[in-house]
Amino acid sequence: MFLGIDVGTSGIKALLVDENQHEVASHTESLTVSRPHAGWSEQDPEDWWKAACRAIDKLHGQHPEAVAAIRGIGLSGQQHGAVLVDASGEVLRPCILWNDTRAEAECALFEERFPLSREVTGNIAMPGFTAPKLLWVARHEPEIFARIRHVLLPKAWLRYRMTGEMIEDMSDASGTLWLDVGKRAWSVEALKATGLTLANMPTLCEGTEPAGVLKEDLTHRWGMTSAPVFAGSAGDNAAGAVGLGAIRNEDAFVSLGTSGVVWVTTNEFRPEHQSAIHAFCHAVPKTWHQMGVTLSAAASLAWWAKVCGVTERDLLAELPERPARPSSVLFAPYLSGERTPHNDGTIRGGFVGLSHDTSRAELTQAVLEGVAFSFRDALEGLTASGSIITEADVIGGGSRSPFWIAILASVLGLRLHSLAHGEHGGAFGAARLARIAATGESVESVCTPPERVSATDPVPELQNAYDQAYSRYRRLYPALRGIQDA
């Protein structure tokens, strides 16, 4: 039996997987995000710990024999978050999350101090990454910065609480701007640019390698036969890729989670800066990946549901089974800024084209289309870099909406595959990594492709209409930027 724990932004998911890779049970504990100032996004790491314990407690109460038989634990984590720890192991301040945009000015400072940053790290410095956050803390909270002994990413901090070990995998480390992504090692020069050294960093390992064992008191708490081994594990997107078996060159998927991702696996380090495409290590050895990111994907629908005072399911229920035409309204999903292709943490979104006849359903469709257009931006950047994508799997909470998938297929011009249990992508991938770490099995034998339950192809007439709508959408960003600058 193997356990995958996904440290998400909106919740902690614990997933039990058996020896046949069947999902036995899962439980999710909700989390909240604190936004004390405009553009800020924080969480208390202690909330992750309590939520993870409650989730495993729940599984233990319902399936004690299965939990007792757990041999390995894997972690999937929201990336880029800065957990600052002092010499006694205590957290110094709330974690600054991946979608926090306060460190805009520090990005330029980082690249000024480390001119080879883009070549070494494979990425443009963006406020969501970890390194600029540390420069912000050094500038604005120097008394806290002076007390920092270790900097951990969210899942690495949870591993520390559960094992006592400070270890990080290559895929998550890639999102810090401190990793030499081609060499799969910390960059001394990048750390120096933020006033840190190798001593402040966790030990690096591959996501498939053993990386600590569960503490004795927790092993006893959950009635486990022996202390499970932890896998090096993965950042959330890499864990999703492992869950999908996306481990070979040009394997691709689209993730409709809180943020959105268009992913392609690569067999080499392939940086592409022009369109703000990320180039990271994969969670499996000798493999990398590229991805384009939109910061507010399913988060855009969640925001719209909150504004309307209803659930997301209520909004989707007002839509037909398939889109007949694009909405007459355009929506820019820049609620937390945007990464690909604009690299603009301060841009904000909006609706354009409202009239007296505009219905709530039409606005909901516009939100879904705006997110799809932002994915098209990402796909265009990946294509420009030389990656070839002809079809992709769809994972994440948004993958449960056939309407949204139909929009995406025609906007992207790709065949999209819906999967059984696509919403468990990160936690399932983490459980797979746990199995490899615990048993020593090969990546290829464990990370097989999942069951595809349906395929959605682009509709030619709708694709043409969306091409025209996308052309109009592309004018939104410069217009909004001009308005904000004014």
Image (tube, helix red, strand yellow):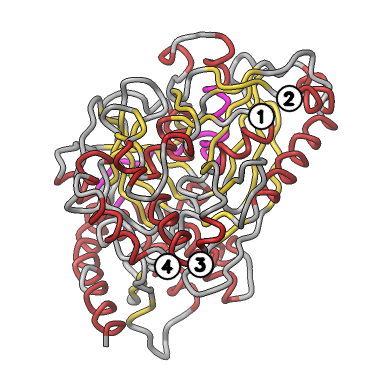
* Mark 1 lies on residue: 164
Of the 4 image quadrants, the one containing the C terminus is: bottom left
* Mark 2 lies on residue: 215
Dot 1 or dot 2: first in sequence order is 1
Tell me if mark 2 has few (under 14), some (14-19) or many (20+) residues whose alpha carbon lies within 10 angstroms of its own: some
The reply to whether dot 2 and dot 3 touch (C-beta < 8 Å) is no
Q: CA distance from mark 2 to mark 3?
A: 34 Å
Q: Amino acid at mark 3?
A: Trp
Residue 415 belongs to the span the image colors magenta: yes
The reply to whether dot 2 and dot 4 touch (C-beta < 8 Å) is no
Q: Amino acid at mark 2?
A: Lys
Q: Main secondary structure of the magenta part?
A: helix
Residue at screen point 81% across, 29% down: 60
* Mark 3 lies on residue: 40
Q: Amino acid at mark 4?
A: Val
Q: Is residue 468 shown left or right of residue 160?
A: left
Q: Which residues are magenta?
A: 409-433
Name the secondary structure under disc 3.
Answer: loop
Q: Is residue 482 shown left or right of residue 30?
A: left
Q: Nearer the viewer, mark 1 or mark 2?
A: 1
